[in-house]
Amino acid sequence: MHDALFIPEIRSAILDTLVADSDTVPHPTLGNPWCPHPIRKDSWRAGQRALAMLARTCRALSEPALDALWHRLHSLEPFLRCMGAKNNVVEDEPGPLAPFNEEEWSIVLHYAPRVQELTVSSADTKILQAVWFCTTLLLPNLRKLHWSDNDIAQIRLMLSPSLVNLYVWLDDGDHTSILGFLEHYHKFCPNVKSLYFNHLDQNLSPLAVAAISRAISRSSELEVLTCHEINEDTITHLIQSHRLKKLFARLHHHHPDNLRRLAGYSALGYTPFQNLRALDLYVQDISSVTPYLHSTHQPFEELSIEFLLITPPEDFHEFFSALNSSMRRQTLRHIRLVHSGPDIINTMQLSFELLNPLLAFSLRTLDLNLTNPISLNDGELVQLAQAWPDLEQLNLNQYNVRSPFCLPSLRGLLLMLARCPKLHTLGLCVDARTIPVLTAEESAIRNVLIQTLGLSYSPIARPVVEGVAHFLLDHLPSLSGLRLMSKFLIKFELDGVIESTYRSMWKAVYEKIKKAKCENSPWRFWESSDGDSEVDFEVLVFENTMTTSSTSY
């Protein structure tokens, strides 16, 4: 073996490269705390094969390669692959799996201590049944567990003090085994720091809600929590926690007045959510969250609020003003506000003055998807962009725009791009009915990061369709998709033109861009849906066939 391979840093870098895999345990993200990251199976299997070959290369590499090979598993099937008699057992094969004999069990004991991250699904049921009476603890060094098997009783084999990240699918929450798990799991894994309780039924019984709430309150080391419905006592417990850093919860079953009342406990001398870094809530009324923001000592980095009720502008102003504190100006980077209630006409506009408190932050993400029309002219959009030079994602009412409104022009869009060079995701309405006359400096502005442009209800005129296509090609050379509304729940007109006509003109823009791309490089084109589909949005995409991987939108 080459002497360089004896250097731990080099050896570790090689092993890390071979572990081409995604996490087994989902990490909640802003606005999307429920879905685990997808498993890249092809790269995972290639990395596994490479590590297995490396483990057989020499003694010096065998142990670290085996540790890397078994560190993260997406099922218990690898244990069967080490056993000749059970290697061909598959999930769909009828009949039970024979219990492990002494030789097979010794193989399990040899590799089990190396496993630190595991995903368990219904496909592993037979294996767990086969080892049920062999031990009370199958993986003694397990740190991350993603349990999506409906038979939760067998999770007992996985619970140990080493566990720090636990994701559990609770089905409907009322099964005896689930209630038993919720009542006692903290005794077996007292060091859990990240807890994810997910279930199918949105309306849990009071018995299940009480059990989940008690389970959360008993986790004394908790730093990250993702859950559905919890009771008021547990909300109070979380408000007072000094350890909690990330909270993702659905509290829409609680009346807004009750949530406001619970925020009042901060008057006892402590700051609510004192060390919280990420807050992601689903509530009835956004104003019920405002009282939690009045403290100036919360170091929020991410804030996502999804709400159901129509909100007047003054409530947004109070919310943004409460959010604006000296500490949060240094830390807050991601803001997401989404109205998810009924799609109804709302004429209560949000002006630039209402958004003014946000200028104090150095934002990287701003996602406002509201029923309230947002009124911005070119100068105001540029002021926003100047305040956020590190902005990476911007969505301003990409999916909900109602007349009357004031929209920035294509020139305003261009000036914003110049001030936000890191912007890679963009969705907003622009007034594209005229092509602006640009200076030489403005004509040179380019953004090569944006690949999909969200346009929603953007007005456009038929005489300028070709000009708009060239404008986008010139200033967004990496553009590979236009995102449009394809399902209109509310009709409106602007200057006598209904919004469906705008959509047809934007499709014409897409066709012009597609034609221009075809003339210069090998591209293929597809549309994600047609006009009769049931989806809300339509993405027109053109992809370069020369790339090794394609992106779907």
Image (tube, rainbow, N blue to C red):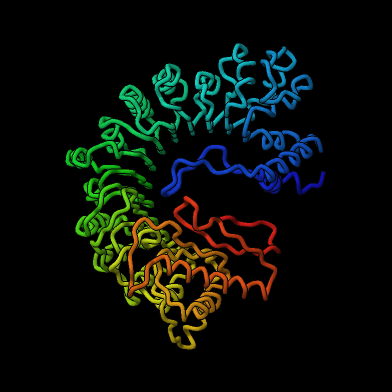
Residue 20 seen: yes
**Front residue of this view, candidates 416 and 339:** 339
Quadrant of the image containing the N terminus: top right
Q: Tell me residue 199's x, y (percent).
A: 43, 31
Quadrant of the image containing the C terminus: bottom right
Corner quadrant of residue 65: top right
Q: Tell me residue 547's x, y (percent).
A: 68, 61
**Above or below for 342 versus 397:** above
Q: Tell me residue 192's x, y (percent).
A: 45, 30
Corner quadrant of residue 132: top right
Q: Is residue 234 left or right of residue 195?
A: left
Q: Residue at x 70, y 58 (%)?
A: 548
**Above or below for 123 versus 268:** above
**Front residue of this view, candidates 376 and 382:** 376
Q: Residue at x 54, y 23 (%)?
A: 158
Q: Is residue 360 left or right of residue 488?
A: left
Residue 187 seen: no
**Front residue of this view, candidates 1 and 87:** 87
**Front residue of this view, candidates 403 and 104:** 403
Q: Tell me residue 483's x, y (percent).
A: 49, 62
**Above or below for 287 versus 515:** above
Q: Residue at x 68, y 19 (%)?
A: 94
Corner quadrant of residue 74: top right
